[in-house]
Image (cartoon, rainbow, N blue to C red):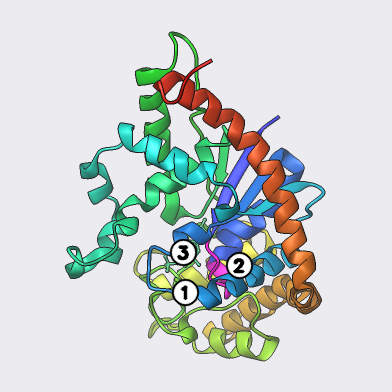
Amino acid sequence: MTRIFSGIQPTGRKHLGNYIGAIRQYVTGQDRGEAIYCIVDLHAITVAYEPAELRARVLDTTAILLAAGLDPERCILFRQGDVREHTELCWLLTSVTAVGELNRMHQFKDKSGAARELIGAGVLFYPVLMAADVLAYRASEVPVGEDQREHVELMRECARRFNSRFAPEGEEVLVVPEHRIPAVGARIMDLQEPTRKMSTSVGGDEGRIFVLDDEATILKKCKRAVTDSENEIRVGPDKPGVTNLVDILAAARGTTVDEALASLADARGYGDLKVAVAEAVNEMLAPVRERYETLRADEAGLEATLAAGAEKARALASETLEDVRAVMGIGPGA
Ligand code: AQP
């Protein structure tokens, strides 16, 4: 059976890109295989944060995932920091990771900018911890958005290198995973700056739709989305705003981009396109919004779900760690 693993930041206010690129794939993953998902509180501390708020954001994110359709009976859902094997494997993987390749990661370059000497080392090591998250479960599939392609490539390289350096001849101690990037909506762009991806940390709220935004807010943000001075609904690199809206429409309705375009044949310009996008997005997100409040109010229930998930996750990760330690010569051995 396919083992699926993915992690998501406890940013609390997940946006449409997170939902289409990742969360929705998590839900369908439960029908495709053995699905394991974690909320990556350890990744969250790589940037400035408030300790008192971190736990609350983890619970916000847990409630969003459950409201979106994750079912703890059909998947393992846990908090990364509850399973110490992640940090141990991260350290062990540094033996097969070069600083040069971490320095070349786009996300590191974007997030470090001119302040490279001053940022926390965790920003550099972020992809190694991400590799540890996935490799600890010997997952074969990683559902992510397009922006994470490079990080999945790195974890594949780590697994290959680890196996060739440490695994006994012909054996695979770590599984080389494949990414799973959605065919439509893999890179949702900012509504105000459609040449840049919709992001949690960059840009203002008017450029991103949150999973928990109400209907009126979604409509307002769609109506204000930046398009261009023409009136022709078509996709292409010269029309990033319209292309993004058509992509969102297709992803929200679960159709192809061509089908979305065909459905707009009678549209009277961008106004109709924007209303169609808002309606489709609202239809997709309304059930999540409706379930969220009740789930979020039950903090003890959310904690119990995460604790039960962590127990199951730990059992799987500790098996991998035992094998990893053994082939690396760490500890007393058998
Ligand atoms: N714009 C996007 N389009 C499609 N998928 C996206 N993802 C993120 N942005 C887009 C996917 O969402 C998943 C969770 O990402 P995360 O855990 O990194 O969450 P985040 O920090 O809240 O998301 P951002 O927006 O990516 O934060 P910034 O930009 O601040 O770093 C991942 O699978 C990701 O691919």
Residue 15 at x, y percent in the picture? 56, 72
Kind of residue at disc 2: Val
Between disc 1 and disc 3, the foreground one is 3
Drawn side of residue 155 relative to residue 29, left or right: left
Q: Secondary structure at mark 1?
A: helix
Residue labelled with disc 2? 58
Kind of residue at disc 3: Ala
The answer to if 87 sits in the magenta stretch is no
Q: Secondary structure at mark 3?
A: helix
Residue labelled with disc 3? 44
Compared with 311, 136 (above or below) is: above
Residue 333 at x, y percent in the picture? 49, 18
Q: Earlier in the sequence, mark 1 or mark 3?
A: 3
Identify which residue is drawn at 56% across, 29% down. 320
Q: Could you tell me which quadrant the C terminus lies in?
A: top right
Residue labelled with disc 1? 242
Kind of residue at disc 1: Val
Dot 2: within a 10 Å radius of its alpha carbon, few (fewer than 14), some, or many (20 or more) residues?
many
Q: Earlier in the sequence, mark 3 or mark 2?
A: 3
Drawn side of residue 179 relative to residue 289, left or right: left
The answer to if 11 sits in the magenta stretch is yes
The residues bearing labels 3 and 2 have C-alpha atoms spaced at a distance of 10 Å
Identify which residue is drawn at 70% across, 73% down. 285
Asked whether 252 or 214 is in front, the reply is 214
Give the magenta range.
9-17
The answer, for residue 143, to whether it is visible in the render is yes
Q: Earlier in the sequence, mark 2 or mark 1?
A: 2
Main SS of the magenta part reads loop
For residue 62, what is the image quadrant?
A: bottom right
